[in-house]
Image: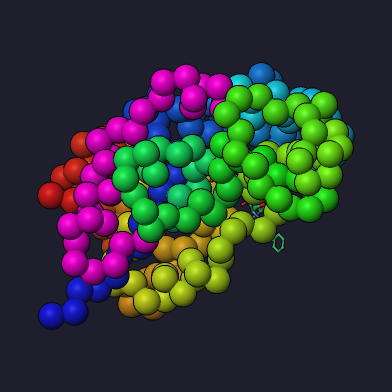
Amino acid sequence: MKYGSIVVLTGAGISAESGLRTFRAADGLWEDHRVEDVATPEAFERDPVLVHRFYNARRRQLLGGVEPNPAHRALARLERDYPGEVLVVTQNIDDLHERAGSRRLIHMHGELLFVRCTRTGRRYPVEGDCSVSQRCECCEAEGRLRPDIVWFGEMPLQMDTIYEALEACELFVAIGTSGHVYPAAGFVEVAAGAGARTLELNLEASRLGSVFEEGRYGPASEQVPLLVE
Ligand code: BV8
């Protein structure tokens, strides 16, 4: 029997119980800056020190003992045990899915633990702070490294692969996302349009709650293991 493929979209809510703050919980605020004002190419152009500080603080927290929670681990079990294909598309820039064991994983908004050279595009892993005085190996120059993250107004990554998977899946599950940010917020309609069943797991109904066929509400660390069992 052919098992249908599953696409899982995750957002900040799946990492909330690991201790990483979600965007909406803080009303999208950080040190009195709106995230949309800090997470943009214009902000980096205008004030790279502020933007590096924003990401250094989050990277330090992530590297300072944050662990995957039962929701991340349940998705890794699903990929291992389910006979059909499972693809996790995360909006999150943390590495908790990888550390829980997920392999078929797309970081559509980039990764906090990498920086890239704005001239060559070369990526470098970063285990601590990044600053404007840091030199990249490719150019041997200062001031060219930026967080390897998709900012507002920039194109998310691997969109073709994601849309292909959405068109082909039998089940689309969104976990811990408020459905504010596009194009991720449009994925449920692509999947439903292609005939997939759609399920939302969230603390409470998201702004797209009524678009999903089914919703199961409560903490991800309880709801995701229940779904996967
Ligand atoms: C693009 C990296 C075009 C940065 C991020 C008007 C309409 C439509 C679109 C737009 C528009 N105006 C502007 C746009 C475009 C814009 C957008 O959507 N803006 C929004 C604000 C309206 N989108 C973009 O700019 C995107 N790019 O459109 O490009 C383009 C086209 C061609 C060529 C070039 C460009 C790029 C968006 C990516 C931005 N980068 N992240 C960083 O992280 O610092 S987005 C960032 O915010 C996160 O990555 C995440 O994706 C998003 C926050 O969303 P969530 O993950 O959903 O988190 P949130 O806090 O909102 O919700 C958490 C949920 O969890 C809640 O529902 C809560 O109830 C739940 N929860 C909490 N605890 C738990 C829980 N659930 C379960 N268990 C728990 N314990």
Q: Is residue 45 above or below residue 64?
A: below
The answer to which of 19 and 66 lies nearer the viewer is 66
Q: Is residue 122 magenta?
A: no
Q: In the shown orientation, is residue 162 left or right of residue 195? A: right
Q: Residue at x 19, y 61 (%)?
A: 82
Q: Residue at x 60, y 39 (%)?
A: 125
Q: Is residue 64 magenta?
A: yes
Toward which corner of the image does residue 220 lie, by quadrant? top left
Outermost residue to the bottom: 1
Where is residue 222 drawn, in percent x and y?
21, 36
Residue 14 visible: no
Q: Residue at x 38, y 43 (%)?
A: 97
Residue 113 visible: yes
Where is residue 123 drawn, in percent x and y?
66, 47
Q: Is residue 57 above or below residue 188?
A: above
Q: Is residue 35 above or below residue 60?
A: below
Number of callouts: 0
Toward which corner of the image does residue 112 lie, by quadrant? top right
Q: Residue at x 53, y 34 (%)?
A: 23
Q: Read off the magenta span.
A: 59-87
Where is residue 190 drawn, in percent x and y?
45, 71
- Its colouring scheme is rainbow
Q: In the shown orientation, is residue 114 left or right of residue 20? A: right
Quick one: quadrant of the N terminus? Answer: bottom left
Where is residue 103 drawn, in percent x and y?
36, 53
Q: Is residue 79 above or below residue 84?
A: above
The answer to which of 172 and 229 lies nearer the viewer is 229
Q: In the shown orientation, is residue 83 left or right of residue 13? A: left
